[in-house]
Image (cartoon, rainbow, N blue to C red):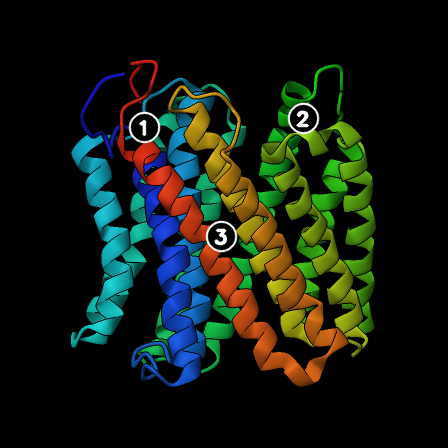
């Protein structure tokens, strides 16, 4: 194994490290906000800061690391490394730090808004030069995400009122849309390679229906978030995704933590649609739907994906360490506490919030400790990347 440090040898390295650290630090600050140990963020406000940073901070770091790595595989064309990659990661980091410094709001907005377009610019050459045109959809997704971020900053700057909630809602659906696309590609492949003899399949009609219904749900949710129509579409999506995952599932996945963690994340995706349907009927609070998706689906899927990608792209065996398997369990328990316990015992809501926050912190702290040396050290097989 080559000695030294290569934190900018490929996109997943700095951005997965940033995402892991952000998952811990952002939650620490958020819990301090809630407990009164820190004043509210002056630029976004406490609730606005939390939603913005988990979506446009933590989640975009994972997306950047994944795309900068996966696009190279899909196209056979190199993505940025070295100093350009370091500069892009630095831009992301500056967007997290500036809201806490005594600087003009316009500077905060300018720096944070620059990240997604610069990421798209970094991906433009390999995506546009490759023969396959289907992957260019990710450039569209990044452009729409930048527009969603703009809506948040316009309100933070006092230019608009009420646009931030539209921007964060739009971003949640964009992340969900990306997850639907990516899971359709990787879940059957990972299952096939991870469980010998299993042949998972995608049904074209179900794949199309999952995308179309999601778009319809987004429109319905923006126009009438608590209507029976929204609830009906969400319930239909839950059924579609049950059928979808049934085409991939085999009970043997439970022998492989790096595989079952992705399936548990997918379970919380289905649960979020069920809760959204119930929320439209007024039976559960809307924020439970949000956290089933953000804490459960996004949180668990990202730690599972980052764990697998980091192992595979550093030449290691695709077997997670026992502490990471514990982290997978902790995040699933944390989602249960954050999403379902407020329904069972709403009087202890604050306790469930702090307990689930603590489980998230421990889970991602384990990820940081285990994967820091993996992400900054060279590949064990002496290959580049």
Query: Contact (CB < 8 A) between labels 3 and 2?
Result: no
Q: Which mark is residue 139?
A: none
345 vs 106, left or right, is: right
Badge 2 local density, few (<14 within 10 Å), some, or many (20+)?
many
Asked if residue 326 lies left or right of residue 19, the reply is right
Estimate the x, y position of residue 381 in percent, counting from the top left. Answer: 34, 14
Name the quadrant of the C terminus: top left
Q: Earlier in the sequence, mark 3 or mark 1?
A: 1
Compare marks 3 and 2 and give the one earlier in the sequence.
2
Residue 116 lies, with reference to residue 45, above or below; the image says above
Query: First in sequence: mark 2 or mark 1?
Result: 1
Q: Are marks 3 and 1 in contact (CB under 8 Å)?
A: no
| Neighbour tally class for label 1: few under 14, some 14-19, many 20 plus, Cα within 10 Å | many
C-alpha distance separating marks 3 and 1: 30 Å
Which residue shows up at 40% across the image and 19% down it? 315
Does residue 226 appear in this view? no
Residue at 32% from the left image edge and 28% from the top image edge: 79
The CA distance from mark 2 to mark 1 is: 27 Å
How many marks on residues?
Answer: 3
Name the residue beneath numbered marker 1.
79
Q: Relative to 25, does residue 245 appear above or below in the rendering?
A: above
Q: Which residue is drawn at 78% across and 79% down?
A: 282
Q: Nearer the viewer, mark 2 or mark 1?
A: 2
Image quarter (top left, top right, bottom left or bottom right) of the N terminus: top left
- Residue 191, which numbered label? 2
Q: In this figure, which residue is indicated by the disc labeled 3?
A: 363
| Relative height, residue 28 to residue 4 (above, below) | below
* Residue 384 on image: x %, y %: 29, 18
x, y percent for residue 355: 55, 69
Viewer can see residue 316: yes
**Quadrant in which residue 106 is drawn:** bottom left
Residue at point 59%, 44% (across, down) = 179
């Amino acid at each position: 194994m080559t000695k030294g440090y290569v934190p900018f040898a490929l996109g997943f390295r700095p951005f997965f490290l940033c995402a892991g650290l952000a998952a811990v630090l952002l939650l620490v600050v958020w819990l301090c906000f809630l407990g009164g140990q820190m004043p509210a963020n002056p630029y976004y406000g406490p609730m606005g800061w939390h939603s913005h940073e988990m979506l446009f901070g933590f989640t975009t770091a994972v997306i950047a690391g994944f795309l900068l790595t996966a696009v190279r595989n899909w196209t056979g064309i190199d993505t940025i490394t070295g100093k350009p990659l370091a500069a892009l990661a630095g831009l992301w980091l500056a967007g997290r730090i500036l809201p806490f410094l005594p600087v003009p709001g316009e500077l905060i907005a300018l720096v944070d808004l620059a990240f997604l377009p610069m990421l798209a610019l970094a991906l433009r050459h390999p995506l546009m030069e490759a023969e396959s045109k289907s992957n260019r959809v990710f450039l569209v997704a990044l452009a729409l995400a930048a527009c969603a971020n703009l809506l948040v900053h316009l309100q933070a700057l006092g230019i608009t009122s009420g646009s931030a909630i539209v921007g964060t809602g739009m971003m949640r659906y964009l992340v969900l849309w990306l997850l639907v696309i990516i899971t359709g590609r990787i879940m059957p492949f990972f299952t096939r390679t991870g469980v010998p003899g299993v042949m998972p399949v995608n049904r074209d009609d179900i794949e199309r229906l999952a995308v179309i219904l999601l778009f319809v749900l987004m429109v319905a949710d923006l126009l009438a978030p608590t209507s029976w129509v929204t609830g009906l579409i969400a319930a239909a999506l839950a059924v579609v995704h049950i059928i979808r995952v049934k085409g991939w599932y085999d009970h043997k996945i439970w022998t492989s933590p790096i595989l079952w963690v992705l399936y548990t994340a997918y379970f919380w995706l289905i649960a979020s649609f069920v809760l959204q349907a119930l929320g439209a009927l007024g039976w559960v609070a809307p924020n439970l739907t949000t956290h089933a998706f953000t804490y459960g689906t996004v949180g668990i899927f990202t730690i599972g994906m980052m764990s697998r990608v980091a192992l595979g792209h550093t030449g290691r065996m695709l077997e997670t360490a026992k502490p990471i398997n514990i982290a997978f369990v902790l995040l699933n328990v944390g989602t249960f506490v954050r999403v379902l316990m407020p329904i069972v015992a709403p009087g202890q809501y604050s306790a469930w919030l702090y307990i689930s926050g603590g489980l998230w912190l421990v889970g991602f702290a384990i990820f940081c400790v285990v994967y820091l040396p993996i992400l900054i050290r060279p590949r064990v097989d002496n290959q580049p990347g």
